[in-house]
Image (cartoon, coloured by chain):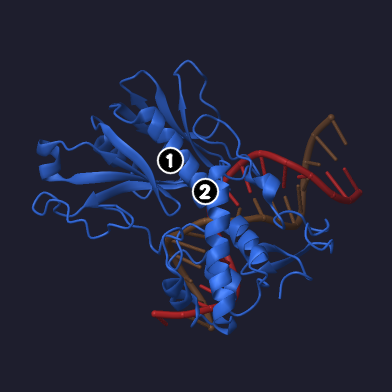
Chain colours: A blue, B red, C brown
Amino acid sequence: MPELPEVETVANGVDARVRGDRIEEAWFSSKPEPMKTPPAAMAKALTGRTIERVRRVGKHIVFDFTPAPERDAVQRVQWIVHLGMTGRLVVADPDVPRPPHTHGVLRLRSGRELRFIDARRFGRMGIHVLEKVLDKPEKPKDEAAGIPGFKGPGTEPLHISKAEFRQLFHLRRTSIKAALLNQSLLHGVGNIYADESLFRAKIRPRRMAARLTTEELDRLHGAVQKVLREAIRLGGSSVSDYVDAAGERGFFQLRHNVYMRTGQPCLVCGAPIRRVVVAGRGTHYCPVCQH
DNA sequence: CATGTTTCCTGACAGC
DNA sequence: TGCTGTCAGGAAACAT
């Protein structure tokens, strides 16, 4: 399931393939509304735009378009895609048959197609309208993220400082696992990387966030960043059917210490990995290494 | 507001 | 073989 490293991999792959390309035609299925923006309105907003850049914000994929003064005067937009659980963005030649559950197709000037495929339809996409950007030419208030326009709900885990990280969690009266999954706090950590980070920080998932010591929070901060960076380097984790824009699988699943390793020996101490449900999610941890 | 619970959706897989 | 039932899980909607 796509979390920050997978989304980053997909966004980079799509960017490399469609940057500078022009959207000649857009189509979206009108199945039980997988979109925040109605399909027809979204197609209209995208048609004729030239893709300037594709990038990741939290678990969202953001499409920026090259300035088009006349259209922008009416409304400047970005296209936001969330892959949900099984969503895939794939660049393909039109003669390659569209797989089942294809819910969106952008026909590009290069002749290729950008396709959105999503079996479970937990994915979401929509048009993000930027506010009056023309009047105020891009004040770079978000220099760290370097991003005008769409912002995720929470803080970027790769950029957050130790102090900020402590502050985010130290008053939370909920399990640290639930807090890590809360996207309005940290934006991008999902079930896999929450479990893997907690293992590396040697913290049990059910511990209440507010009861963690400063050292533990600092350890967790380091673990989250390390795990995410390493996963990005390996192209993400391919557990169910995740693939990048070229259809390639990632390799971080080979480095998992606990996720989906229930009953198997801990790679550090040999104790069997335990699985419980926390915050409604399957949660994996080592009962010996984690306290 | 903060936190917990339910819902959406379908492929995969267990059990008969 | 083929059917039925259960489960997974991100995030929004709803409930407490």
To which residue does mark 2 refer? A5
| Residue A16 shows in the view | yes
Residue A97, label in figure: none
Extreme residue toward the top, this view: A95
> In the image, A33: left or right of A77?
right
Considering the image in quadrants, where does the C terminus of chain A appear? bottom right
User: At which x and y percent is residue A186?
Assistant: 46, 64
**Circle 2: element type:** helix
Q: Earlier in the sequence, mark 1 or mark 2?
A: 2
Query: Given the image, on which type of amino acid does mark 1 rest?
Result: Ala
- Circle 1: is it few (<14), some (14-19), or many (20+) Cα within 10 Å? many
Give the residue at x 59% y 62%.
A194
- The answer to whether A288 is drawn above or below residue A22 in the figure is below
Task: Specify the quadrant of the image occupied by residue A45.
Answer: top left
- Circle 2: is it few (<14), some (14-19), or many (20+) Cα within 10 Å? many
Task: Specify the quadrant of the image occupied by residue A240.
Answer: top right
Q: Nearer the viewer, residue A277 or A206?
A: A206
User: At which x and y percent is residue A11?
Assistant: 43, 40
To which residue does mark 1 refer? A11
- The answer to whether A231 is drawn above or below residue A101 in the figure is below
**Circle 1: element type:** helix
Query: Given the image, on which type of amino acid does mark 2 rest?
Result: Pro
Q: How many marks?
A: 2
| Residue A121 shows in the view | no
Q: Chain of mark 1?
A: A
Give the residue at x 68% y 63%.
A283
Give the residue at x 54% y 44%.
A233
> In the image, A106: left or right of A77?
right
